[in-house]
Amino acid sequence: MKVPILKLGRILLTSIQVELSDADALQFQSDLVRRVAEVEAQGVAIDISALDVVDSYMARVINDTTSMAQLLGAEVVVCGIQPYVAMTLVEMGRGLIGADCVFDLEQGLERLMQRIRHRGDADLTTGQ
């Protein structure tokens, strides 16, 4: 199953709407990292608000994906962690290390734009 990745200027938006198999999670990771490099993305918003459960493997995939995108130069935010998911991740000793977490996609885009502007990067919409 492919997870859609939308491009708004040099920001990528993706929303995981269903539980992913391990293979699907790795495919998502590969697709997103490849897309970050292709468009030289300045920011990535990963929306997981539809997920009621994030197991340790999916948490690791999100962490690793975040790290990979950051190594390529993109700012990353994770949007919409459900309260139960947050409690479970903490109980498992798994947080989302290295990723800013916000309540929703709107806040995620605001945070990305603030961080990108703070870095002094070029125009967000044209990629120049």
Image (spheres, grey):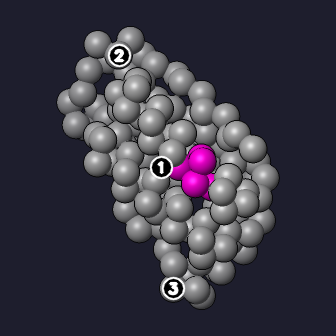
Residue 104 lies, in percent from the top left, at: 63, 48
Looking at the image, tell me whether mark 3 or mark 2 is earlier in sequence order.
Answer: 3
Q: Residue at x 46, y 62 (%)?
A: 63
Location of mark 2 (residue):
127
Q: Is residue 91 above or below residue 8?
A: below
Please state if 85 lies on the left or on the right of 40 as rendered: right
Residue 54 shows which numbered tag? none
- Mark 1 belongs to which amino acid? Val
- Name the secondary structure under disc 1: strand
Please state if 127 lies on the left or on the right of 2 as rendered: left
Question: Which quadrant holds the N terminus?
Answer: top right
**Is residue 3 rendered magenta in the image?**
no
What secondary structure predominates along the stretch shown in magenta?
A: helix
C-alpha distance separating marks 1 and 2: 19 Å
C-alpha distance separating marks 1 and 3: 20 Å
Looking at the image, tell me whether mark 1 or mark 2 is earlier in sequence order.
Answer: 1
Location of mark 3 (residue):
93
Please state if 10 lies on the left or on the right of 31 as rendered: left
